[in-house]
Image (tube, rainbow, N blue to C red):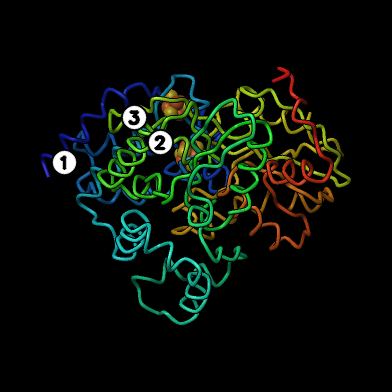
C-alpha cells in the first residue's frame, strides 16, 4: 500500500497546479447534470490529494469517482491554470487499479478487443445478435453491467466483414501526388465501414494514395480509461511502430479519440513519437489539400464537433462544414459533450445517455433532419439519443456526404484552393 501511495504522490507536481478555482464546474457535462463535486475535475483532484496526504484510508474507494468521467477533456481545455486533468486521471486510475482489480467482464472485453484483433474480426458480425440475446438472458453479476444496457440501445448493425478485411492494402490514386496511412480505428472498422470507403474514394479523387492496415489494432484508449495502462502502452507501441514503418507523409484518422490516444497521450506514456503528423480527415482536406466541395443539401442540418478537438480545431471544422455543405445550417444552443466517452457509455449507460438526450431533444425541437459529426463515438451516441427522442434526424460523417456528391455531380479534381 505504501508503494501505491508513493506512486500517487508522484502526481503531486501536476496536482498542485490546480488552484481550486472551480472554473471546471461550468464545463463538465457530468457536474452540470448532477451538481456533485466528485463529478468535476476539482473534486477528483482533491480526492487524489487526500489519499496521498493520508486523509483518506480507503484509497481504492476513490476509483469509482475517477471512473465517473467521460474523459471529454473539457476541464483541461478550459482550465485557467492549464492543469493536465486527463494525465492526472489516467495515471491515478492506473495506480488505483492495482488495489481495485478490473471486473472479469472488463478483462474479457479488453483481451478480445486489444489482443485478438483477428478473433474480434471473426466474431464481430455475430456480436449484435449475441449482445441483444445476452442482454435479455444473462443475469450474471459480472456480465450484467456490460450486457444490460444493450437491451435499451439503438445500435448500428456490426458490418458483416470488417473494413480492414475488405479494404486492407494500398489504394493507389491516378496521378498520385502523395501517400497517406489511414488508421480506421475499431468503430469505423466494425460499425462504419462506409466512412472508410468514403475516405479512400475522396482522397483517391484528389490524387492521394491511401494505405489501409490489413489488421486494425485498437488504439488502446479503452484500456487506459479502465486503468490498464500497460495494455494501453502495448497498443500504442504496436500501432506507432507499424505507422512509422510505412512509407507515407501523413496519418489520417476519422476518430478524434484514436487520434488523441495515438498522437497526444500515447507518446507521453510510451515515449514513442510518430514520424509523420496525424490529421483528422476533414482537417486534412481543409488544411493540407485545401479542398472545396460546396455541395447543396436540401435538409436542415447541424454539426456536432467532438470534444477531443481543441477549440481552434473545433471552430475550423465547423466552418469547413458550413462552407462546404450549402443548406440550412443550424447552430445548436447546446454545444456540450455528447456524453459517450467509450467505456463510460458501457459502464454508466443511463448517465451517458442522459447527457446525450438534452442535445437530441434540441435536434428534435428545431426540426433538424441531419446531424453531421466527424466522430464515430458521437455518431453512435447521438443516433441512440435521437431515435429515443422521437426525432427522425439522420447522423452522418460529412465525408460520406462528400463522397456521394463527388460521384453524383462529378466534382472536379481541380476544385481546390491551392489548385493542386
Ligand atoms: S482543474 Fe483547473 S479549472 Fe478546475 S479547479 Fe483546478 S485550476 Fe480551477
Ligand atoms: S473530463 Fe469531462 S467529464 Fe471528466 S471531469 Fe473533466 S469535464 Fe468532467
Pick whichever of labels 1 and 2 is earlier in the sequence: 1
Q: Secondary structure at mark 3?
A: helix
* Quadrant position of residue 294: top right
Q: Position of residue 158 (x, y in %)?
A: 55, 64
Q: Is residue 328 left or right of residue 404?
A: right
Q: CA distance from mark 3 to mark 2?
A: 7 Å
- Badge 2 is on which residue? 262
> Residue at horizontal 80%, vertical 35%?
411
Residue 56 vertical placement versus 167 (above, below):
above
Query: Does mark 3's beta carbon lie closer than 8 Å to ligand 2?
Result: no
Label ID, residue 267: 3
Q: CA distance from mark 1 to mark 2?
A: 27 Å
Q: Residues within 10 Å of mark 1 (few under 14, many from 20)?
A: some
Residue lying at the far bottom of the rendered structure: 137
Q: Is residue 162 left or right of residue 271?
A: right
Report the label total.
3
Q: Secondary structure at mark 1?
A: helix
Q: Secondary structure at mark 2?
A: helix
The image quadrant in which ligand 1 is located: top left
Residue lying at the far left of the rendered structure: 2
> Residue at horizontal 57%, vertical 48%?
376
Query: Does mark 1's beta carbon lie closer than 8 Å to ligand 2?
Result: no
Residue 21 visible within the image: no
Residue closest to the eye, 236 or 276? 276
> Residue at horizontal 25%, vertical 44%?
230
Q: Position of residue 155 (x, y in %)?
A: 59, 64
Pick whichever of labels 3 and 1 is earlier in the sequence: 1
Label 1 vs label 2, nearer the camera = 2
Q: Position of residue 15 (x, y in %)?
A: 32, 27
Q: Position of residue 47 (x, y in %)?
A: 32, 39
Tell me the quarter of the image containing the C terminus: top right
- Badge 1 is on which residue? 4
Amino acid at each position: 500500500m505504501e508503494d501505491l501511495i508513493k506512486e500517487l504522490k508522484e502526481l503531486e507536481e501536476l496536482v498542485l497546479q490546480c488552484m481550486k478555482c472551480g472554473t471546471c464546474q461550468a464545463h463538465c457535462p457530468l457536474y452540470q447534470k448532477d451538481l456533485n463535486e466528485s463529478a468535476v475535475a476539482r473534486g477528483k483532484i482533491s480526492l487524489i490529494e487526500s489519499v496521498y496526504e493520508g486523509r483518506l484510508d480507503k484509497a481504492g474507494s476513490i476509483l469509482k469517482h475517477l471512473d465517473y468521467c467521460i474523459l471529454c477533456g473539457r476541464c483541461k481545455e478550459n482550465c485557467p491554470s492549464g492543469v493536465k486533468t486527463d494525465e492526472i486521471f489516467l495515471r491515478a486510475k492506473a495506480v488505483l487499479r492495482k488495489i481495485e482489480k478490473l471486473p472479469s467482464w472488463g478483462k474479457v472485453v479488453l483481451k478480445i478487443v486489444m489482443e485478438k484483433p483477428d478473433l474480434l474480426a471473426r466474431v464481430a458480425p455475430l456480436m449484435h445478435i449475441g449482445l441483444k440475446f445476452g442482454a435479455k438472458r444473462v443475469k450474471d453479476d459480472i456480465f450484467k453491467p456490460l450486457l444490460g444496457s444493450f437491451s435499451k440501445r439503438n445500435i448500428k448493425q456490426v458490418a458483416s466483414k470488417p473494413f480492414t478485411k475488405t479494404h486492407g492494402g494500398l489504394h493507389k490514386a491516378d496521378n498520385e501526388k502523395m501517400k497517406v496511412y489511414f488508421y480506421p480505428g475499431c468503430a469505423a472498422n466494425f460499425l462504419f465501414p462506409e466512412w472508410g470507403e468514403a475516405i479512400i474514394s475522396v482522397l483517391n479523387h484528389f490524387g492521394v494514395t491511401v494505405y489501409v492496415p490489413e489488421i486494425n489494432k485498437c488504439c488502446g484508449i479503452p484500456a487506459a480509461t479502465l486503468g490498464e495502462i500497460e495494455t494501453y502502452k502495448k497498443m500504442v507501441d504496436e500501432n506507432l511502430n507499424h505507422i512509422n514503418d510505412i512509407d507515407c507523409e501523413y496519418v489520417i484518422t476519422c476518430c478524434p479519440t484514436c487520434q488523441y490516444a495515438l498522437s497526444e497521450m500515447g507518446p507521453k506514456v510510451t515515449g514513442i513519437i510518430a514520424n509523420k503528423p496525424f490529421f483528422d480527415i476533414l482537417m486534412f482536406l481543409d488544411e493540407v489539400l485545401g479542398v472545396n466541395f460546396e455541395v447543396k443539401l436540401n435538409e436542415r442540418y447541424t454539426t456536432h464537433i467532438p470534444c477531443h478537438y481543441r477549440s481552434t480545431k473545433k471552430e475550423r471544422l465547423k466552418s469547413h462544414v458550413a462552407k462546404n455543405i450549402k443548406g440550412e445550417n443550424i447552430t445548436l444552443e447546446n454545444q456540450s459533450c455528447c456524453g459517450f466517452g467509450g467505456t463510460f457509455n458501457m459502464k454508466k449507460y443511463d448517465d451517458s445517455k442522459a447527457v446525450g438526450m438534452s442535445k437530441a431533444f434540441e435536434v428534435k425541437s428545431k426540426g433538424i433532419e441531419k446531424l453531421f459529426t466527424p466522430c464515430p463515438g458521437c455518431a453512435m451516441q447521438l443516433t441512440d439519443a435521437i431515435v429515443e427522442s422521437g426525432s427522425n434526424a439522420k447522423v452522418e460523417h460529412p465525408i460520406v456526404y462528400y463522397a456521394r456528391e463527388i460521384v453524383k455531380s462529378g466534382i472536379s479534381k481541380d476544385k481546390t484552393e491551392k489548385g493542386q
